[in-house]
Image: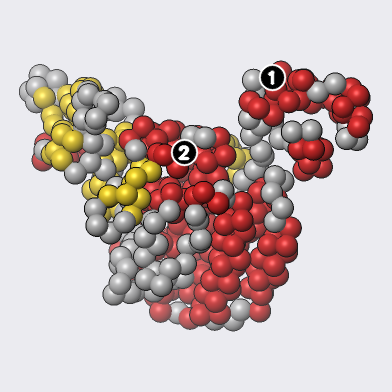
Amino acid sequence: MNPLHLSGYGVKVKVCNLKSRSDLEVTDGREDRRPSTSTRFRPRRFPYSSVIIDGHSGYISLQALHWLSRNKIPVFVMNFDGTLISSILPPMPVKADLRAAQILAAKNPNKKFDIARALVQAKTARSLQVLDWLGERYDIAREIRVTRFEASKLRNASTVPDVRVVEGRVARRYWEAFRKVMPESLDFQGRMTTSHQNNATDPVNAALNYGYGFLEGECRRSINTIGLEPSVGFLHDFSDYQTKQSLVYDLQEPFRWLTDISVVEAFESGALKLRDFFFTGDDYRYRLEIEAKFRFIELLNARYNSGVLYRGRVLKWDTVIEQKAIELAHFLSGKSFTLDFAEPAPNLKRRVDRELRARILALTQFEAKEVGIGKSTLHSLRQKARSSRDFGLHSSVRRKLAVLA
């Protein structure tokens, strides 16, 4: 994942010197403290995986759309709150047999149930993993226990509505734990709203929405690449009040943790702060300052581009999303009789910040002994703290160090 993000006023995307060079010229938008900049790219030398535009002033020419399509580069237009307004995707492969199998599976209660259950199994597994990751630093043992109990009820589900009930209850407990770890100053109350539109009246929801917008774009791209029908889902039905891209919503579920982890890291590290958000318009929804938005996008990119071992290969997470779309296509067409969205599982490790590194290096043997840290453990901690690499800490060691803070 390496999107070209364009924002601000006066975004321009056009093709120059059509006969001699056919360069794509991209002009980023202006902001209060940032002048506009222009860059040119040769055909087949575009270094980005997609173009994401969340500016509201500017244009993209028809020739530029042609250029991007021929170079297989999708274009996503987002609202300031992360809502995906439209997508312009490269030509979709025509696979009538696959689409016919997808529609038949959506009408088959047993097949639909198998796919919906596999999606929720993966989502709940990742939700529990994120909570365990949070539990290394925060006191949410009760929330983890209750969420795990709700997730265990999935084994008793026998219909798609049953699966949705379990998903909803797990999500409720998950967001209760999430609310507990967020600073009170951010006023995060959860994701559930009476309007079910998740309007971002707090900074945490604003960041979550923006991150989910990125994820939606990746899922749309993968579905388009494989040739699946995006409007025919299995966990999400057709609805008059939501987008018709039901399969896009389905494919997002096992990978929402990518955004959730990035949001936690953003606020913990200070990449996002309360002062980076402001209200806009008359609907009182938060909007991100442009510089903070770039910092958050860097965190999202780092998370999507982290490697994971899967079937003997190290894949990035955007590639895993596409791989799962391929596996779904094989299941629908009868080339495979099993479906598992839960693998590969991420290896979540805490990234130790500078303050904690400094605390470890300043720790004396006497202080370490006082809190129950042995000489060998202290030596190992010092070696890790001097290294430039990220490293994890066992929860018991982290609690002992917290006593000295």
Spatial separation of the CA atoms under disc 2 and disc 1? 26 Å
Work out whether residue 239 can be spotted: yes
Give the total number of marks visible in the rendering.
2
Instruction: Using the image, determine if residue 108 lies above or below residue 139.
Output: below
Q: Position of residue 127 (x, y in %)?
A: 60, 57
Q: Compared to 149, does 367 lie above or below?
A: above
Residue 77 as seen in the image, left or right of residue 307: left
Which of the pair 90/384 is nearer the observer? Answer: 384
Residue 112's spot in the image, x, y percent? 48, 74
Which residue appears at 79% of the width and 26% of the height? 381
Which residue is painted at 30% across and 53% down in the image? 84
Q: Within 10 angstroms of label 2, few (less than 14), some, or many (20 or more) residues?
A: many
Q: Nearer the viewer, residue 179 or 17?
A: 179
Disc 1 crowd, CA 10 A, few/some/many (<14, 14-19, 20+): few
Q: What residue would you read off at disc 2?
A: 272
Q: Is residue 384 above or below residue 321?
A: above
Q: Residue 94 occupies which quadrant of the picture?
A: bottom left
Q: Hey, which quadrant is residue 25 in on the image? A: top left
Q: Which quadrant does the N terminus fall into?
A: top left
Q: Earlier in the sequence, mark 2 or mark 1?
A: 2
Residue 165: percent from left, percent from top: 55, 76
Asked if residue 93 can be seen in this view, the reply is no
Q: Is residue 206 left or right of residue 131?
A: left
Residue 228 falls left or right of residue 338:
left
The three-letter amino acid code for the residue at tag 1 is: Ser
Tell me the number on the disc at residue 387.
1
* Residue 241 image label: none
Residue at horizontal 52%, vertical 41%?
Answer: 267
What element does badge 1 sit on?
A: loop
